[in-house]
Amino acid sequence: ETGVTQSPTHLIKTRGQQVTLRCSSQSGHNTVSWYQQALGQGPQFIFQYYREEENGRGNFPPRFSGLQFPNYSSELNVNALELDDSALYLCASSGGTGDTEAFFGQGTRLTVV
Amino acid sequence: LAKTTQPISMDSYEGQEVNITCSHNNIATNDYITWYQQFPSQGPRFIIQGYKTKVTNEVASLFIPADRKSSTLSLPRVSLSDTAVYYCLVGDEVTGGGNKLTFGTGTQLKVEL
């Protein structure tokens, strides 16, 4: 157990819909990163939040957006869902400068039909 | 970011030592080398990190030659539960508050009886 929890664990949405995924970071961690992992591929960095501000973004379109709250939990929002958005979405938390590893949650499996 | 190359898959038997080599010819001076392990439908889990020479923890050893253009993850006496995908990551963002990790496709290790 990493102390990082994600909800829901599984989700089925229809193309064109919007989805919100949630992540509670490990206690004491102020940095949350989101990753998308397609089947058979490694996780791909979406974006990171540090103390409620976006702190870097990967090669994902603007319909992928996020939030970080004062308690450092985070949300990933995806608008206008496409079939290719079907993937495992992973949240990782870390404690900031000097921290050598990221702690991942178990992920949310999103299926777009 | 330095690109990494590692074998797509490896097979082993219980009790054997497994060595997974990762090539990173363009590694920069500030880059660290980090390995993660991932089981199906779970988030990656940090295994080990190093900069040069040898690093050992309770799970694995990491060997890094002087030129740092490659590294080898060594798993002593593997068991069935070590069957997983192993990712080699290189970059200066793998430490500290960055943790904007760049994953490749990893090495699928299969351990049999």
Image: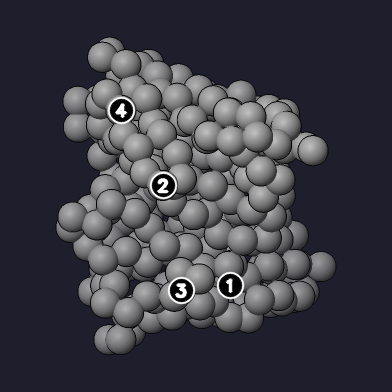
Q: What residue is shown at x 59% (from left), y 35% (from top)? A: B77
For the residue pair A38 and B77, the one nearer the viewer reads as B77
Residue denoted by label 1: A79
Q: What residue is shown at x 19% (from left), y 25% (from top)? A: B29
Residue A8 pos. (x, y %): 63, 81
Q: Nearer the viewer, mark 4 or mark 3?
A: 4
- Chain under disc 1: A
Residue denoted by label 4: B54
Residue sitting farthest toward the bottom:
A70
Q: Are marks 3 and 2 in contact (CB under 8 Å)?
A: no
Say yes or no: labels 1 and 2 on the same chain: no
Answer with the quarter of the image where residue A73 lies. bottom left
Count the marks: how many?
Answer: 4
Circle 3: residue type: Val
Residue denoted by label 2: B58
- Chain under disc 3: A
Residue denoted by label 3: A4
Circle 1: residue type: Asn
